[in-house]
Image: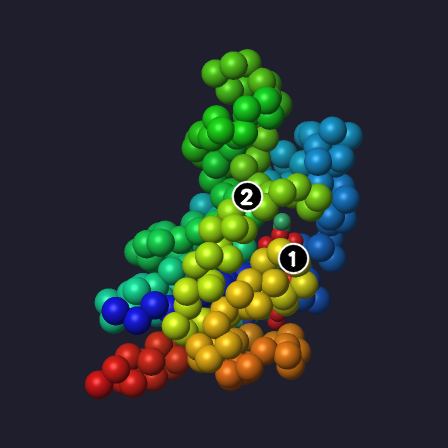
Amino acid sequence: MQKIVVLTGAGISAESGIRTFRDSDGLWEEHRIEDVATPQAWHRNPELVLEFYNQRRKQLLSAQPNAAHFALNRLADFFDVHIITQNVDDLHERSGSKNVLHLHGELKKCRSTSDASLIYDVKGWELKMGETCEKGSQLRPHIVWFGEDVPQIIEAARIASTAEIFVVIGTSMKVYPAAGLLDYVPQYSPKYLIDPDAPTISWISNLEIIKEKAGKGLPVLVEKLIKQLH
Ligand code: OAD
């Protein structure tokens, strides 16, 4: 089976009702990154940080995967599909996709502040101060904050470097190291970028830009790729 690697960002979940970060109504319009998504914010005001992610988690519980998530699931019937997502939601998994690598963590999980290997499911939507790991340390959201290492990037780069086709969906490509993954994709592999407001990436060869919303553009691309097999 041909290997398709897909890099997704907040845009693929926009049609599920989950706000992106940098669009005009995006989350970073309303919240300052320094207040809610850095280790310093956590030390300064952990209640505020927990509340920010509790609200995200609450929203996620009522969201459903959309046509774009399901299209990727269909693609996996015909190709060896690997999804690298910057998203912390679980909509890829809930649409049935396997091989999902979360670069920036997972909203429905939390981890120990003293031992990063102790990872737990959050029960319901709320994580509170005073909730501790088995060693007695406070639990924090299982999210990669700005200024923290991205432990999964090495594996993601390895996967990207083996892509026979690479598809990018709904990311502003402003956050590194995720945005740098395109540089690992073999030059000759066809690349597609689906985003109604696609960022300019002129230095990448074999790149087709599809200026559509994911829910419309991705099902069309998936059918095209499947057709090319016959
Ligand atoms: P951004 O909010 O930066 O970019 C979202 C992209 O999705 C934009 O390019 C939009 O044009 C596009 N978009 C909006 N609606 C769409 C739709 N219906 N279909 C397709 N595309 C659509 O989100 P990311 O690039 O994912 O990290 O942001 C990267 C990281 O920055 C996030 O993972 C998060 C954030 O800060 C952390 O919190 C660590």
Q: Residue at x 54, y 55 (%)?
A: 86
Residue 140, above or below 169: above
The picture quadrant for ligand 1 comes to bottom right
- How packed mark 2 is, by other alpha carbons closer than 10 Å (few <14, some 14-19, many 20 or more), is few
Label 2 C-beta lies within 8 Å of the nearest ligand 1 atom? no
Quarter of the image for residue 163 reads: bottom left
Asked if disc 1 and disc 2 are in contact, CB closer than 8 Å, the reply is no
Secondary structure beneath dot 1 equals loop
- How packed mark 1 is, by other alpha carbons closer than 10 Å (few <14, some 14-19, many 20 or more), is few
For the C terminus, the quadrant is bottom left
**Where is residue 132 drawn, in percent x and y?**
54, 19
Whether residue 213 appears in this view of the structure is no
Return the residue nearer the eye: 27 or 177.
177
Which amino acid type is shown beneath numbered disc 1? Answer: Tyr
Which of marks 2 and 1 precedes in the sequence? 2
Question: Looking at the rendered structure, which numbered label has been put on residue 151?
Answer: 2
Residue 130, above or below 59: above
Return the residue nearer the eye: 68 or 5.
5
**Where is residue 134 drawn, in percent x and y?**
48, 16
Question: Looking at the rendered structure, which numbered label has been put on residue 176?
Answer: 1
**Where is residue 31 drawn, in percent x and y?**
73, 49
Quarter of the image for residue 216 reads: bottom left
Quarter of the image for residue 4 reads: bottom left
Q: Residue at x 47, y 63 (%)?
A: 160
Which amino acid type is shown beneath numbered disc 2? Answer: Pro
Specify whether 102 is left or right of 92.
right
